[in-house]
Image (tube, rainbow, N blue to C red):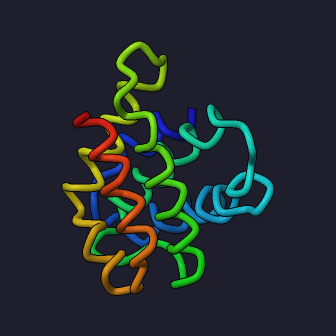
Amino acid sequence: QVRRCLSRVGQLPTDSMHNALSPSLKALIADKLIKHSDGDVKVALAYCLIYLTRITAPDAPYNEHQMEEVLRLIVSSFENLHDKSSRWYEKRISILKIFAEVKLCLEMLNLECDTLILEMFQNFFKTIR
């Protein structure tokens, strides 16, 4: 439901819309969710977080440490991008499209997430193979 609502919000929301998004911003970055062990939860969360980054682009919705966690989660969603039979396949593709659209790779470079960049490319090479 959160993702559906977020998909309707345009980029650079008004102050009132930004205030309305604030509870979701805080809830989605909670350790209980961001460090969840279930793969389905991780992809669903990455799906919501990628929409939040689209809405707030070009600004990051979180501080540097939190953005590293968000990016780590998003990159982990690319791990099984090759599995077209997965019920999460379409969502992973949407995550990848928005990732490219808002140029999150530049954020990864700014935050010097070299290991994460390497992991992302390994996931892409795995998909290509």
Q: Position of residue 23 (x, y in %)?
A: 66, 60
Q: Residue at x 80, y 55 (%)?
A: 32
Q: Vertically, is 100 above or below 82?
A: below
Horizontally, residue 54 falls left or right of residue 63, namely: left
- Which of the 4 image quadrants contains residue 95? top left
Q: Residue at x 36, y 49 (%)?
A: 9
Q: Vertically, is 85 above or below 58?
A: above
Q: How many circles with numbers are drawn on the protein?
A: 0
Quadrant (top left, top right, bottom left, bottom right) of the C terminus: top left
Horizontally, residue 32 falls left or right of residue 117, namely: right
Residue sitting nearer the eye, 94 or 81:
81
Horizontally, residue 7 falls left or right of residue 41, namely: left
Horizontally, residue 113 falls left or right of residue 43, namely: left
- Which of the 4 image quadrants contains residue 89? top left
Q: Position of residue 58 (x, y in %)?
A: 27, 74
Q: Position of residue 70 (x, y in %)?
A: 53, 63
Residue sitting nearer the eye, 117 or 91:
117
Residue sitting nearer the eye, 95 or 37:
37
Q: Residue at x 31, y 35 (%)?
A: 93
